[in-house]
Amino acid sequence: MSRPTTGDTAPAAPSPDTSPAPAMSRRETLEALSGILLGVLVSLLATTIVSTSLPRIVADLDGSQHSYTWVVTAMLLTMTISTPLWGKLADLTNRKVLMQVALLVTVLSAAAAGLSQNIEWLIACRAFQGIGAGGVMSLATVLMADIISPRERGKYMGLMGGVMAVAQIGGPLLGGVITDTISWRWTFFVGVPFAVAALITLQRTLHLPRREARAVRIDYVGATLIAVTVALLLLWVTFAGDQFEWASWQTAAMVGGAVVALVATVFVERAVPEPILPLHLFRNRTFVLSVVASASVGVAMFGTAVFLAQYFQLARGKTPTESGLLTIPMVVGTMLAGVVLGRIISATGRYKGIMIGGAAVLSLSLFGLSTIEVDTSFVVISVFLFGLGLSVGALMQNLVLATQNTLDVHEMGAGTSGVAFFRSLGGAIGVSVLGAVMAARVKSDVTAGLTDLGVPASATGGGAGAVPDLTQVPEPVRAVIEQAYSNGITEIFLLAVPMAVISLVAVIFIKEIPLGKRSGIEQVLDEEEATGDDTRAAVPAS
Protein backbone atom coordinates (compact mmCIF):
# COMPACT_ATOMS: atom_id res chain seq x y z
CA MET A 1 0.00 0.00 0.00
CA SER A 2 1.33 3.42 -0.87
CA ARG A 3 2.34 5.97 1.69
CA PRO A 4 -0.48 8.43 2.53
CA THR A 5 -0.03 11.92 1.19
CA THR A 6 0.41 14.28 4.12
CA GLY A 7 2.00 17.30 2.48
CA ASP A 8 0.53 19.85 0.10
CA THR A 9 1.45 17.99 -3.08
CA ALA A 10 -0.32 15.97 -5.72
CA PRO A 11 -0.19 12.15 -5.42
CA ALA A 12 2.81 10.62 -7.15
CA ALA A 13 2.38 9.41 -10.71
CA PRO A 14 3.23 5.81 -11.69
CA SER A 15 6.79 5.08 -12.76
CA PRO A 16 7.58 5.79 -16.44
CA ASP A 17 8.23 2.15 -17.27
CA THR A 18 4.79 1.09 -16.07
CA SER A 19 2.13 0.70 -18.74
CA PRO A 20 -0.81 2.90 -17.82
CA ALA A 21 -4.11 1.29 -17.00
CA PRO A 22 -6.77 1.90 -19.61
CA ALA A 23 -9.06 4.82 -18.81
CA MET A 24 -12.83 4.45 -18.87
CA SER A 25 -14.48 5.66 -22.05
CA ARG A 26 -16.76 8.67 -21.91
CA ARG A 27 -19.78 6.42 -22.35
CA GLU A 28 -18.71 4.11 -19.51
CA THR A 29 -18.05 7.11 -17.29
CA LEU A 30 -21.44 8.66 -18.01
CA GLU A 31 -23.21 5.34 -17.41
CA ALA A 32 -21.49 4.89 -14.07
CA LEU A 33 -22.07 8.55 -13.21
CA SER A 34 -25.80 8.27 -13.98
CA GLY A 35 -26.41 5.97 -11.02
CA ILE A 36 -24.36 8.16 -8.67
CA LEU A 37 -26.13 11.35 -9.72
CA LEU A 38 -29.57 9.75 -9.52
CA GLY A 39 -28.79 8.74 -5.95
CA VAL A 40 -27.72 12.30 -5.15
CA LEU A 41 -30.92 13.63 -6.74
CA VAL A 42 -33.14 11.35 -4.65
CA SER A 43 -31.31 12.19 -1.43
CA LEU A 44 -31.44 15.94 -2.06
CA LEU A 45 -35.11 15.82 -3.09
CA ALA A 46 -35.96 14.05 0.16
CA THR A 47 -34.21 16.90 1.97
CA THR A 48 -35.29 19.98 0.00
CA ILE A 49 -38.88 19.02 -0.74
CA VAL A 50 -39.97 19.99 2.78
CA SER A 51 -38.12 23.31 2.95
CA THR A 52 -41.03 25.47 1.77
CA SER A 53 -43.51 23.40 3.79
CA LEU A 54 -41.75 23.61 7.15
CA PRO A 55 -43.53 26.74 8.43
CA ARG A 56 -46.91 25.04 7.88
CA ILE A 57 -45.69 21.64 9.13
CA VAL A 58 -44.33 23.08 12.37
CA ALA A 59 -47.48 25.18 12.87
CA ASP A 60 -49.73 22.12 12.30
CA LEU A 61 -47.71 20.08 14.80
CA ASP A 62 -47.84 22.92 17.36
CA GLY A 63 -44.08 23.48 17.23
CA SER A 64 -42.13 26.55 18.33
CA GLN A 65 -39.39 28.55 16.63
CA HIS A 66 -36.86 26.41 18.50
CA SER A 67 -38.47 23.19 17.26
CA TYR A 68 -38.47 24.65 13.73
CA THR A 69 -34.72 25.08 14.07
CA TRP A 70 -34.31 21.55 15.44
CA VAL A 71 -36.20 19.98 12.54
CA VAL A 72 -33.30 21.23 10.44
CA THR A 73 -30.52 20.94 13.03
CA ALA A 74 -31.31 17.30 13.90
CA MET A 75 -30.67 16.30 10.30
CA LEU A 76 -27.51 18.39 10.04
CA LEU A 77 -26.27 16.99 13.37
CA THR A 78 -26.56 13.33 12.34
CA MET A 79 -25.28 14.14 8.85
CA THR A 80 -22.22 15.74 10.43
CA ILE A 81 -21.56 12.93 12.88
CA SER A 82 -22.06 10.13 10.34
CA THR A 83 -20.10 11.68 7.44
CA PRO A 84 -16.58 10.72 8.63
CA LEU A 85 -17.80 7.21 9.49
CA TRP A 86 -19.22 6.75 5.97
CA GLY A 87 -15.95 8.07 4.55
CA LYS A 88 -13.85 5.64 6.57
CA LEU A 89 -16.07 2.73 5.59
CA ALA A 90 -15.60 3.80 1.97
CA ASP A 91 -11.86 3.22 2.35
CA LEU A 92 -12.42 -0.22 3.88
CA THR A 93 -15.47 -1.81 2.24
CA ASN A 94 -17.64 -1.91 -0.90
CA ARG A 95 -18.48 1.69 -1.80
CA LYS A 96 -21.37 0.82 -4.08
CA VAL A 97 -23.18 -1.20 -1.39
CA LEU A 98 -22.59 1.64 1.08
CA MET A 99 -24.17 4.09 -1.36
CA GLN A 100 -27.23 1.89 -1.72
CA VAL A 101 -27.59 1.47 2.06
CA ALA A 102 -27.29 5.23 2.61
CA LEU A 103 -29.96 5.85 -0.02
CA LEU A 104 -32.35 3.40 1.61
CA VAL A 105 -31.87 4.97 5.05
CA THR A 106 -32.54 8.44 3.61
CA VAL A 107 -35.78 7.61 1.84
CA LEU A 108 -37.30 5.23 4.42
CA SER A 109 -36.74 7.69 7.26
CA ALA A 110 -38.27 10.46 5.13
CA ALA A 111 -41.33 8.30 4.56
CA ALA A 112 -41.58 7.66 8.30
CA ALA A 113 -41.52 11.42 8.87
CA GLY A 114 -44.69 11.69 6.79
CA LEU A 115 -46.52 9.76 9.53
CA SER A 116 -45.57 12.30 12.21
CA GLN A 117 -48.25 13.13 14.77
CA ASN A 118 -46.05 15.42 16.86
CA ILE A 119 -42.96 17.53 16.41
CA GLU A 120 -40.75 15.15 18.41
CA TRP A 121 -41.39 12.25 16.00
CA LEU A 122 -40.65 14.51 13.04
CA ILE A 123 -37.34 15.62 14.55
CA ALA A 124 -36.36 11.98 15.26
CA CYS A 125 -37.12 10.92 11.67
CA ARG A 126 -35.15 13.85 10.29
CA ALA A 127 -32.22 12.75 12.44
CA PHE A 128 -32.25 9.29 10.82
CA GLN A 129 -32.63 10.95 7.43
CA GLY A 130 -29.45 12.89 8.10
CA ILE A 131 -27.50 9.66 8.63
CA GLY A 132 -28.42 8.47 5.15
CA ALA A 133 -27.96 11.87 3.51
CA GLY A 134 -24.48 12.18 4.99
CA GLY A 135 -23.57 8.87 3.38
CA VAL A 136 -25.02 9.68 -0.03
CA MET A 137 -23.34 13.09 -0.35
CA SER A 138 -19.90 12.01 0.89
CA LEU A 139 -19.88 8.71 -1.03
CA ALA A 140 -20.96 10.41 -4.26
CA THR A 141 -17.82 12.57 -4.35
CA VAL A 142 -15.63 9.61 -3.39
CA LEU A 143 -17.11 7.49 -6.20
CA MET A 144 -16.56 10.33 -8.66
CA ALA A 145 -12.90 10.39 -7.62
CA ASP A 146 -12.78 6.66 -8.38
CA ILE A 147 -13.90 6.97 -11.98
CA ILE A 148 -12.80 10.50 -13.02
CA SER A 149 -9.38 12.18 -12.88
CA PRO A 150 -9.02 15.50 -11.00
CA ARG A 151 -8.42 17.39 -14.27
CA GLU A 152 -11.69 16.12 -15.77
CA ARG A 153 -13.61 16.13 -12.50
CA GLY A 154 -14.47 19.82 -12.65
CA LYS A 155 -16.50 19.24 -15.82
CA TYR A 156 -18.36 16.28 -14.38
CA MET A 157 -18.87 18.03 -11.07
CA GLY A 158 -20.72 20.58 -13.17
CA LEU A 159 -23.22 17.80 -13.88
CA MET A 160 -23.54 17.23 -10.14
CA GLY A 161 -24.10 20.97 -9.75
CA GLY A 162 -26.89 20.71 -12.32
CA VAL A 163 -28.46 17.79 -10.46
CA MET A 164 -28.23 19.71 -7.20
CA ALA A 165 -29.87 22.68 -8.88
CA VAL A 166 -32.73 20.52 -10.18
CA ALA A 167 -33.26 19.15 -6.68
CA GLN A 168 -33.07 22.60 -5.13
CA ILE A 169 -35.54 24.02 -7.65
CA GLY A 170 -37.81 21.01 -8.06
CA GLY A 171 -37.83 20.05 -4.39
CA PRO A 172 -39.20 23.26 -2.87
CA LEU A 173 -41.57 23.81 -5.81
CA LEU A 174 -42.90 20.26 -5.72
CA GLY A 175 -43.18 20.42 -1.94
CA GLY A 176 -45.06 23.71 -2.11
CA VAL A 177 -47.51 22.42 -4.72
CA ILE A 178 -48.15 19.18 -2.82
CA THR A 179 -48.63 21.09 0.45
CA ASP A 180 -51.04 23.57 -1.12
CA THR A 181 -53.06 21.01 -3.10
CA ILE A 182 -52.94 17.73 -1.13
CA SER A 183 -51.13 17.60 2.21
CA TRP A 184 -47.63 18.27 3.50
CA ARG A 185 -47.40 14.60 4.51
CA TRP A 186 -47.14 13.54 0.87
CA THR A 187 -43.96 15.55 0.48
CA PHE A 188 -42.24 12.82 2.52
CA PHE A 189 -43.68 9.92 0.51
CA VAL A 190 -43.03 11.15 -3.02
CA GLY A 191 -39.35 10.14 -3.04
CA VAL A 192 -39.93 6.40 -2.62
CA PRO A 193 -40.41 5.47 -6.34
CA PHE A 194 -37.41 7.64 -7.27
CA ALA A 195 -35.33 5.76 -4.70
CA VAL A 196 -36.25 2.41 -6.25
CA ALA A 197 -35.17 3.73 -9.66
CA ALA A 198 -31.89 5.01 -8.21
CA LEU A 199 -31.09 1.66 -6.56
CA ILE A 200 -31.71 -0.24 -9.81
CA THR A 201 -29.62 2.22 -11.81
CA LEU A 202 -26.73 2.02 -9.36
CA GLN A 203 -26.80 -1.77 -9.46
CA ARG A 204 -26.77 -1.91 -13.26
CA THR A 205 -24.35 0.88 -14.16
CA LEU A 206 -21.77 1.30 -11.39
CA HIS A 207 -19.02 -1.36 -11.66
CA LEU A 208 -15.88 -0.81 -9.62
CA PRO A 209 -12.72 -2.95 -9.78
CA ARG A 210 -11.85 -5.17 -6.88
CA ARG A 211 -9.75 -3.27 -4.34
CA GLU A 212 -7.05 -4.73 -2.13
CA ALA A 213 -8.68 -6.45 0.84
CA ARG A 214 -8.26 -4.56 4.10
CA ALA A 215 -9.29 -5.57 7.58
CA VAL A 216 -12.41 -3.66 8.63
CA ARG A 217 -11.60 -2.02 11.95
CA ILE A 218 -14.26 0.50 12.85
CA ASP A 219 -13.17 3.18 15.30
CA TYR A 220 -16.31 3.08 17.39
CA VAL A 221 -14.73 4.95 20.31
CA GLY A 222 -13.58 7.78 18.06
CA ALA A 223 -16.98 7.96 16.34
CA THR A 224 -18.72 8.14 19.73
CA LEU A 225 -16.41 10.87 21.02
CA ILE A 226 -16.91 12.94 17.85
CA ALA A 227 -20.67 12.54 18.23
CA VAL A 228 -20.56 13.64 21.88
CA THR A 229 -18.40 16.67 21.05
CA VAL A 230 -20.67 17.86 18.24
CA ALA A 231 -23.90 17.14 20.12
CA LEU A 232 -22.82 19.03 23.25
CA LEU A 233 -21.78 22.08 21.24
CA LEU A 234 -25.05 22.13 19.29
CA LEU A 235 -27.18 21.69 22.40
CA TRP A 236 -25.30 24.53 24.07
CA VAL A 237 -25.66 27.05 21.25
CA THR A 238 -29.33 26.12 20.80
CA PHE A 239 -30.49 26.48 24.41
CA ALA A 240 -28.06 29.06 25.83
CA GLY A 241 -29.72 32.44 26.20
CA ASP A 242 -33.20 30.85 26.17
CA GLN A 243 -33.43 27.88 28.50
CA PHE A 244 -30.50 29.09 30.61
CA GLU A 245 -28.07 32.00 30.73
CA TRP A 246 -24.91 32.04 28.61
CA ALA A 247 -22.86 32.35 31.82
CA SER A 248 -24.27 29.44 33.83
CA TRP A 249 -23.40 26.01 35.18
CA GLN A 250 -25.16 24.44 32.19
CA THR A 251 -22.82 26.30 29.84
CA ALA A 252 -19.81 25.22 31.85
CA ALA A 253 -20.97 21.59 31.82
CA MET A 254 -21.70 21.46 28.09
CA VAL A 255 -18.66 23.38 26.89
CA GLY A 256 -16.39 21.63 29.37
CA GLY A 257 -17.76 18.25 28.34
CA ALA A 258 -17.24 19.08 24.66
CA VAL A 259 -13.61 20.12 25.30
CA VAL A 260 -12.91 16.93 27.28
CA ALA A 261 -14.50 14.81 24.51
CA LEU A 262 -12.47 16.65 21.86
CA VAL A 263 -9.17 16.09 23.71
CA ALA A 264 -10.07 12.42 24.19
CA THR A 265 -10.86 12.19 20.45
CA VAL A 266 -7.38 13.41 19.56
CA PHE A 267 -5.74 10.80 21.80
CA VAL A 268 -7.94 8.01 20.46
CA GLU A 269 -7.41 8.97 16.81
CA ARG A 270 -3.64 8.96 17.35
CA ALA A 271 -3.73 5.47 18.89
CA VAL A 272 -6.18 3.42 16.79
CA PRO A 273 -4.99 1.67 13.59
CA GLU A 274 -7.90 2.93 11.46
CA PRO A 275 -8.93 6.37 12.78
CA ILE A 276 -12.20 7.91 11.62
CA LEU A 277 -10.37 11.13 10.81
CA PRO A 278 -6.60 10.51 10.39
CA LEU A 279 -4.76 13.30 12.19
CA HIS A 280 -1.90 13.39 9.67
CA LEU A 281 -4.37 14.92 7.21
CA PHE A 282 -4.07 18.12 9.23
CA ARG A 283 -0.46 18.40 8.03
CA ASN A 284 -1.87 18.86 4.53
CA ARG A 285 -2.17 22.63 4.02
CA THR A 286 -4.86 22.37 1.35
CA PHE A 287 -6.95 20.06 3.54
CA VAL A 288 -6.76 22.40 6.55
CA LEU A 289 -7.60 25.54 4.58
CA SER A 290 -10.42 23.73 2.75
CA VAL A 291 -11.80 22.63 6.11
CA VAL A 292 -11.79 26.22 7.39
CA ALA A 293 -13.38 27.54 4.20
CA SER A 294 -15.94 24.71 4.07
CA ALA A 295 -17.00 25.28 7.67
CA SER A 296 -17.49 28.97 6.95
CA VAL A 297 -19.40 28.25 3.74
CA GLY A 298 -21.53 25.77 5.69
CA VAL A 299 -22.53 28.47 8.16
CA ALA A 300 -23.41 30.87 5.37
CA MET A 301 -25.13 28.27 3.18
CA PHE A 302 -27.18 26.19 5.64
CA GLY A 303 -27.52 28.80 8.36
CA THR A 304 -29.15 31.39 6.12
CA ALA A 305 -30.89 29.53 3.30
CA VAL A 306 -32.88 27.43 5.74
CA PHE A 307 -34.65 30.51 7.09
CA LEU A 308 -35.57 32.01 3.70
CA ALA A 309 -38.88 30.13 3.71
CA GLN A 310 -39.81 31.86 6.95
CA TYR A 311 -38.97 35.26 5.49
CA PHE A 312 -41.06 34.70 2.37
CA GLN A 313 -44.02 33.12 4.18
CA LEU A 314 -44.05 34.90 7.53
CA ALA A 315 -42.58 38.29 6.63
CA ARG A 316 -44.02 38.59 3.12
CA GLY A 317 -47.17 36.45 3.37
CA LYS A 318 -46.35 34.11 0.47
CA THR A 319 -47.63 30.54 0.05
CA PRO A 320 -45.26 27.54 0.14
CA THR A 321 -45.44 27.32 -3.68
CA GLU A 322 -44.64 31.02 -4.10
CA SER A 323 -41.84 30.66 -1.57
CA GLY A 324 -40.30 27.91 -3.68
CA LEU A 325 -40.55 30.00 -6.85
CA LEU A 326 -38.81 32.92 -5.17
CA THR A 327 -35.73 30.78 -4.42
CA ILE A 328 -35.16 30.00 -8.13
CA PRO A 329 -32.53 32.78 -8.62
CA MET A 330 -30.33 31.23 -5.95
CA VAL A 331 -30.60 27.78 -7.50
CA VAL A 332 -29.97 29.08 -11.03
CA GLY A 333 -26.80 30.72 -9.73
CA THR A 334 -25.65 27.42 -8.21
CA MET A 335 -26.36 25.54 -11.44
CA LEU A 336 -24.57 28.05 -13.66
CA ALA A 337 -21.55 28.09 -11.38
CA GLY A 338 -21.35 24.31 -11.35
CA VAL A 339 -21.72 23.81 -15.10
CA VAL A 340 -19.85 26.81 -16.51
CA LEU A 341 -17.08 27.14 -13.93
CA GLY A 342 -16.59 23.38 -13.85
CA ARG A 343 -15.87 23.35 -17.59
CA ILE A 344 -13.46 26.26 -17.21
CA ILE A 345 -11.56 24.38 -14.51
CA SER A 346 -11.34 21.23 -16.65
CA ALA A 347 -10.15 23.27 -19.65
CA THR A 348 -7.54 25.33 -17.80
CA GLY A 349 -6.65 23.24 -14.77
CA ARG A 350 -6.95 26.39 -12.62
CA TYR A 351 -9.37 26.66 -9.74
CA LYS A 352 -8.04 29.05 -7.09
CA GLY A 353 -9.12 32.27 -8.82
CA ILE A 354 -12.66 30.92 -9.19
CA MET A 355 -12.83 30.08 -5.48
CA ILE A 356 -11.52 33.51 -4.48
CA GLY A 357 -14.15 35.16 -6.66
CA GLY A 358 -16.84 32.90 -5.18
CA ALA A 359 -15.89 33.79 -1.60
CA ALA A 360 -15.91 37.52 -2.42
CA VAL A 361 -19.36 37.29 -4.03
CA LEU A 362 -20.60 35.28 -1.03
CA SER A 363 -19.57 38.07 1.36
CA LEU A 364 -21.23 40.77 -0.78
CA SER A 365 -24.42 38.75 -1.28
CA LEU A 366 -24.88 38.07 2.42
CA PHE A 367 -24.30 41.73 3.22
CA GLY A 368 -26.89 42.69 0.61
CA LEU A 369 -29.42 40.26 2.12
CA SER A 370 -28.82 41.81 5.54
CA THR A 371 -30.31 45.07 4.22
CA ILE A 372 -33.69 43.71 3.05
CA GLU A 373 -36.88 44.92 4.69
CA VAL A 374 -40.49 43.79 4.79
CA ASP A 375 -41.19 45.78 1.61
CA THR A 376 -37.94 45.25 -0.34
CA SER A 377 -38.43 44.60 -4.05
CA PHE A 378 -38.29 40.93 -4.97
CA VAL A 379 -36.10 41.91 -7.93
CA VAL A 380 -33.45 43.22 -5.54
CA ILE A 381 -33.76 40.13 -3.35
CA SER A 382 -33.41 37.93 -6.46
CA VAL A 383 -30.10 39.61 -7.36
CA PHE A 384 -28.72 38.91 -3.89
CA LEU A 385 -29.98 35.31 -3.98
CA PHE A 386 -28.44 34.75 -7.42
CA GLY A 387 -25.09 35.93 -6.05
CA LEU A 388 -25.48 33.62 -3.04
CA GLY A 389 -26.13 30.64 -5.31
CA LEU A 390 -23.29 31.56 -7.66
CA SER A 391 -20.81 31.76 -4.80
CA VAL A 392 -21.87 28.47 -3.22
CA GLY A 393 -21.56 26.77 -6.61
CA ALA A 394 -18.07 28.20 -7.06
CA LEU A 395 -16.89 27.09 -3.62
CA MET A 396 -18.57 23.94 -2.34
CA GLN A 397 -17.47 21.28 -4.87
CA ASN A 398 -14.21 22.99 -5.79
CA LEU A 399 -12.98 22.92 -2.19
CA VAL A 400 -13.49 19.15 -2.32
CA LEU A 401 -11.74 18.97 -5.70
CA ALA A 402 -8.71 20.91 -4.43
CA THR A 403 -8.45 18.58 -1.44
CA GLN A 404 -8.89 15.36 -3.42
CA ASN A 405 -6.10 16.48 -5.75
CA THR A 406 -3.61 16.23 -2.83
CA LEU A 407 -4.89 13.00 -1.24
CA ASP A 408 -3.49 9.50 -1.47
CA VAL A 409 -5.92 7.22 -3.30
CA HIS A 410 -6.23 4.95 -0.25
CA GLU A 411 -7.41 7.83 1.95
CA MET A 412 -9.78 9.44 -0.52
CA GLY A 413 -12.81 8.49 1.55
CA ALA A 414 -11.48 9.80 4.87
CA GLY A 415 -10.11 13.01 3.36
CA THR A 416 -13.18 13.80 1.26
CA SER A 417 -15.57 13.07 4.09
CA GLY A 418 -13.39 15.18 6.40
CA VAL A 419 -14.07 18.28 4.32
CA ALA A 420 -17.77 17.38 4.13
CA PHE A 421 -17.79 16.78 7.90
CA PHE A 422 -16.57 20.26 8.73
CA ARG A 423 -18.90 21.83 6.15
CA SER A 424 -21.86 20.05 7.77
CA LEU A 425 -20.55 20.94 11.22
CA GLY A 426 -20.36 24.60 10.24
CA GLY A 427 -23.87 24.36 8.82
CA ALA A 428 -25.26 22.66 11.92
CA ILE A 429 -23.68 25.16 14.29
CA GLY A 430 -24.75 27.97 11.98
CA VAL A 431 -28.36 26.86 11.95
CA SER A 432 -28.34 26.45 15.73
CA VAL A 433 -26.69 29.79 16.49
CA LEU A 434 -28.57 31.81 13.89
CA GLY A 435 -31.81 30.03 14.76
CA ALA A 436 -31.36 30.90 18.44
CA VAL A 437 -30.60 34.52 17.54
CA MET A 438 -33.61 34.72 15.26
CA ALA A 439 -35.90 33.10 17.83
CA ALA A 440 -34.84 35.58 20.50
CA ARG A 441 -35.24 38.56 18.14
CA VAL A 442 -38.64 37.45 16.84
CA LYS A 443 -39.95 36.72 20.33
CA SER A 444 -38.75 40.08 21.61
CA ASP A 445 -40.17 42.05 18.67
CA VAL A 446 -43.52 40.23 18.70
CA THR A 447 -43.91 40.69 22.44
CA ALA A 448 -43.04 44.40 22.19
CA GLY A 449 -45.33 44.89 19.18
CA LEU A 450 -48.28 43.17 20.83
CA THR A 451 -47.73 45.15 24.02
CA ASP A 452 -47.92 48.39 22.02
CA LEU A 453 -51.20 47.19 20.53
CA GLY A 454 -52.52 46.13 23.92
CA VAL A 455 -52.96 42.57 22.62
CA PRO A 456 -52.06 39.39 24.57
CA ALA A 457 -49.34 37.06 23.19
CA SER A 458 -51.97 34.34 22.61
CA ALA A 459 -53.27 36.44 19.71
CA THR A 460 -50.48 34.97 17.54
CA GLY A 461 -52.03 31.53 17.83
CA GLY A 462 -49.75 29.92 20.39
CA GLY A 463 -47.70 32.59 22.12
CA ALA A 464 -44.86 34.86 21.12
CA GLY A 465 -42.44 31.94 20.79
CA ALA A 466 -44.61 29.79 18.51
CA VAL A 467 -44.45 29.65 14.72
CA PRO A 468 -47.71 31.42 13.79
CA ASP A 469 -50.30 30.69 11.14
CA LEU A 470 -50.86 34.11 9.55
CA THR A 471 -54.26 33.11 8.20
CA GLN A 472 -55.56 32.80 11.77
CA VAL A 473 -54.55 36.22 13.15
CA PRO A 474 -56.10 39.72 12.71
CA GLU A 475 -54.42 42.26 10.42
CA PRO A 476 -52.73 44.44 13.10
CA VAL A 477 -51.18 41.37 14.73
CA ARG A 478 -50.14 40.05 11.33
CA ALA A 479 -48.23 43.28 10.62
CA VAL A 480 -46.34 42.90 13.92
CA ILE A 481 -45.39 39.31 13.11
CA GLU A 482 -44.26 40.15 9.58
CA GLN A 483 -42.02 42.96 10.79
CA ALA A 484 -40.55 40.75 13.52
CA TYR A 485 -39.58 38.01 11.07
CA SER A 486 -38.17 40.55 8.64
CA ASN A 487 -35.97 41.99 11.40
CA GLY A 488 -34.90 38.50 12.48
CA ILE A 489 -33.87 37.29 9.03
CA THR A 490 -31.82 40.42 8.24
CA GLU A 491 -30.00 40.11 11.53
CA ILE A 492 -28.88 36.53 10.88
CA PHE A 493 -27.72 37.41 7.35
CA LEU A 494 -25.54 40.14 8.85
CA LEU A 495 -24.10 37.71 11.39
CA ALA A 496 -23.17 35.34 8.55
CA VAL A 497 -21.04 37.93 6.72
CA PRO A 498 -17.91 37.48 8.92
CA MET A 499 -18.00 33.73 8.21
CA ALA A 500 -17.97 34.42 4.48
CA VAL A 501 -14.96 36.71 4.98
CA ILE A 502 -13.16 33.88 6.79
CA SER A 503 -13.77 31.60 3.79
CA LEU A 504 -12.30 34.31 1.53
CA VAL A 505 -9.13 34.54 3.60
CA ALA A 506 -8.79 30.74 3.69
CA VAL A 507 -9.04 30.24 -0.09
CA ILE A 508 -6.56 33.08 -0.70
CA PHE A 509 -3.92 31.06 1.18
CA ILE A 510 -4.67 27.75 -0.57
CA LYS A 511 -1.71 26.71 -2.73
CA GLU A 512 -2.89 25.83 -6.22
CA ILE A 513 -1.58 22.39 -7.22
CA PRO A 514 -1.81 21.26 -10.88
CA LEU A 515 -4.79 18.93 -11.24
CA GLY A 516 -3.84 15.27 -11.71
CA LYS A 517 -4.85 13.31 -14.80
CA ARG A 518 -5.34 9.86 -13.23
CA SER A 519 -8.62 8.65 -11.78
CA GLY A 520 -8.72 6.69 -8.54
CA ILE A 521 -9.33 3.43 -10.39
CA GLU A 522 -6.36 4.08 -12.68
CA GLN A 523 -4.09 4.81 -9.73
CA VAL A 524 -5.10 1.59 -8.00
CA LEU A 525 -4.67 -0.47 -11.17
CA ASP A 526 -1.27 1.10 -11.80
CA GLU A 527 -0.17 0.27 -8.25
CA GLU A 528 -1.29 -3.32 -8.65
CA GLU A 529 0.48 -3.64 -12.00
CA ALA A 530 3.64 -2.03 -10.67
CA THR A 531 3.78 -4.60 -7.85
CA GLY A 532 3.02 -7.48 -10.24
CA ASP A 533 -0.32 -8.18 -8.53
CA ASP A 534 -2.97 -7.02 -10.94
CA THR A 535 -5.27 -10.02 -10.69
CA ARG A 536 -7.37 -8.61 -7.87
CA ALA A 537 -7.99 -5.36 -9.69
CA ALA A 538 -9.06 -7.00 -12.93
CA VAL A 539 -12.18 -8.66 -11.55
CA PRO A 540 -15.25 -6.50 -10.94
CA ALA A 541 -16.34 -6.57 -7.31
CA SER A 542 -19.70 -4.96 -7.77
Image (cartoon, rainbow, N blue to C red):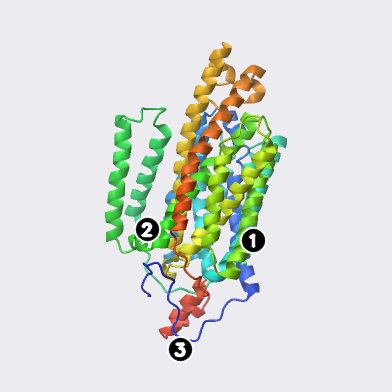
Between tags 2 and 3, which lies in front? Answer: 3
Between tags 1 and 3, which lies in front? Answer: 1
Q: Earlier in the sequence, mark 1 or mark 2?
A: 2
Say what amino acid the circle numbered 2 marks.
Ile
Is residue 506 found left or right of 31 in the rendered image?
A: left
Which residue is labeled 1 in the image? 340
**Residues at badges 1 and 3 in contact (C-beta under 8 Å)?**
no
Image location of residue 389, percent across then percent down = 60, 49
- Residue at 47 percent across and 82 percent down: it is 535
Between tags 1 and 2, which lies in front? Answer: 1
**Residues at badges 2 and 3 in contact (C-beta under 8 Å)?**
no
Q: Is residue 86 visible?
A: no
Where residue 276 is drawn, which disc sits there?
A: 2
Image location of residue 396, percent across then percent down = 53, 55
Q: Nearer the viewer, residue 316 or 172?
A: 316
Q: Earlier in the sequence, mark 1 or mark 3?
A: 3
Number of labelled discs? 3
Q: Nearer the viewer, residue 441 or 503?
A: 503
Q: Earlier in the sequence, mark 2 or mark 3?
A: 3
Tag 1 secondary structure: helix
Say what amino acid the circle numbered 1 marks.
Val
Image location of residue 352, percent across then percent down = 51, 61
Quarter-of-image position of residue 269: bottom left
Spatial separation of the CA atoms under disc 2 and disc 3: 36 Å
Quarter-of-image position of residue 472: top right
Q: Quadrant of the N terminus?
A: bottom left
Q: Residues within 10 Å of mark 2 (few under 14, many from 20)?
A: many
Q: Is residue 326 visible?
A: yes
Where residue 520 is drawn, which disc sits there?
A: none
Which residue is labeled 3 in the image? 17
Say what amino acid the circle numbered 3 marks.
Asp
